[in-house]
Image (cartoon, rainbow, N blue to C red):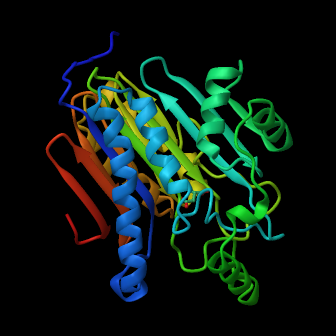
């Protein structure tokens, strides 16, 4: 089957997310809301600049995700959640729909922008998925920017871990807000790409890895169908193979992207999971679907731009 590329320099699309969860007006201060909206706009600015300039979807998703990794309001890079032991273990993935080339890392501890490390795995190694210490070594060998663990931490993440321990609650984020970040893009040449980056879930143990870096689960891109980035209860998203499943419904079942995304999120819900996805397709479909009260999200094209947080917006 050949790719359904539809070159259209002005037909680019970009969709981003900064996590889904119990995100309601009563739980977000005006200052937090303003800062989060501003960060989402900056991420859209970064990705849109690449696409409007005729750049590749792959470069756009990396650019957008890097902005969100550097922003402390999201659970990725600076602002990543803490493990049970009080460390930061970061997961990220990137995938190019042109060739289905992919790169992913899990449990890395010192790379400022894990999405850049995922891209290096894709482009500079013969592998797709590197984990832990080996991935950290590869990062240094690649000359990527290294930071101490302090760079990732924020007082709010420490408070969340302390609360989780005080409540002896499960591994889930205490206030059920996932802050993983992701981007999907369609470029003017008709190619799609996806990237996702996360600190995982607060209080995670035993080298736990969620869906974000798992190709076909939290991240997937295939020019024959769509690009997907997910956020939510990672264990369920892995079991449903969310990214691949949305693509398969479109490619093999002929479903529209929104119908496929909604159906797969219904499967996640049926298994007890929560969260959301963003999707773009080579046809120009660009959308989100989520089961939670809110999702930090935004979309841009040559003529449109939306940033939203709560479920009842845009
Ligand atoms: N899906 C991520 C994970 O399970 C969490 C998130 O979306 O924030 O690691």
Can residue 290 be seen here? The reply is: no
Residue 141 position by quadrant: top right
Please give left or right for residue 98 compared with residue 140 in the image.
Answer: left
Residue 233 x, y percent position in the rendering = 55, 61
Residue at horizontal 78 percent and vertical 61 percent from the top:
149
| Residue lying farthest to the top in this orientation | 2
Q: Nearer the viewer, residue 294 or 184?
A: 184
Residue 196 x, y percent position in the rendering = 52, 46
Residue at horizontal 76 percent and vertical 83 percent from the top:
165
Quadrant of the image where one finds ligand 1: bottom right
Residue 105 x, y percent position in the rendering = 69, 40
Residue at horizontal 60 percent and vertical 79 percent from the top:
174
**Tally of numbered tags:** 0
Please give left or right for residue 216 compared with residue 83 in the image.
Answer: left
Q: Nearer the viewer, residue 192 or 239?
A: 192
Residue 143 x, y percent position in the rendering = 74, 33
Residue at horizontal 84 percent and vertical 69 percent from the top:
85
Please give left or right for residue 106 compared with residue 179 in the image.
Answer: right
């Amino acid at each position: 089957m050949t790719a359904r590329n539809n070159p259209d320099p002005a037909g680019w699309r970009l969709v981003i997310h900064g996590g889904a969860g119990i995100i309601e007006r009563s739980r977000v201060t005006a200052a937090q809301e303003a800062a989060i909206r501003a960060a989402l706009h900056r991420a859209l600015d970064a990705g849109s600049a690449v696409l409007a300039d005729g750049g590749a979807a792959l470069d756009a998703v990396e650019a957008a995700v890097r902005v969100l990794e550097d922003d402390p309001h999201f659970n990725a890079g600076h602002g990543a959640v803490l493990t049970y032991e009080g460390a930061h273990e970061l997961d990220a993935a990137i995938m190019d729909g042109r060739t289905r080339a992919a790169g992913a890392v899990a449990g890395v501890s010192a790379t400022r922008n894990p999405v850049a490390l995922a891209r290096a795995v894709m482009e500079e190694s013969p592998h797709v998925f590197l984990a832990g210490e080996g991935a950290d070594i590869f990062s240094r060998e690649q000359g990527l920017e290294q930071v101490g663990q302090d760079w990732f931490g924020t007082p709010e993440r420490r408070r969340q871990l302390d609360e989780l321990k005080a409540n002896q609650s499960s591994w889930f984020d205490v206030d059920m807000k996932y802050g993983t970040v992701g981007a999907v893009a369609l470029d003017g040449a008709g190619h799609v790409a996806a990237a996702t980056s996360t600190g995982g879930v607060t209080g995670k143990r035993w080298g736990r890895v969620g869906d974000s870096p798992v190709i076909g689960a939290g991240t997937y891109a295939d020019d024959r169908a769509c690009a997907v980035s997910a956020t939510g209860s990672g264990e369920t998203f892995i079991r449903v193979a969310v990214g691949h499943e949305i693509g398969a419904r479109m490619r093999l079942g002929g479903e529209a992207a929104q119908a496929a995304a909604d159906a797969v999120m219904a499967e996640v819900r049926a298994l007890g999971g929560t969260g959301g996805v963003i999707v773009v397709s080579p046809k120009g479909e660009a959308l989100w679907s989520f089961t939670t009260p809110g999702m930090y999200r935004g979309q841009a094209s040559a003529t449109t731009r939306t940033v939203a947080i709560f479920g009842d917006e845009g």
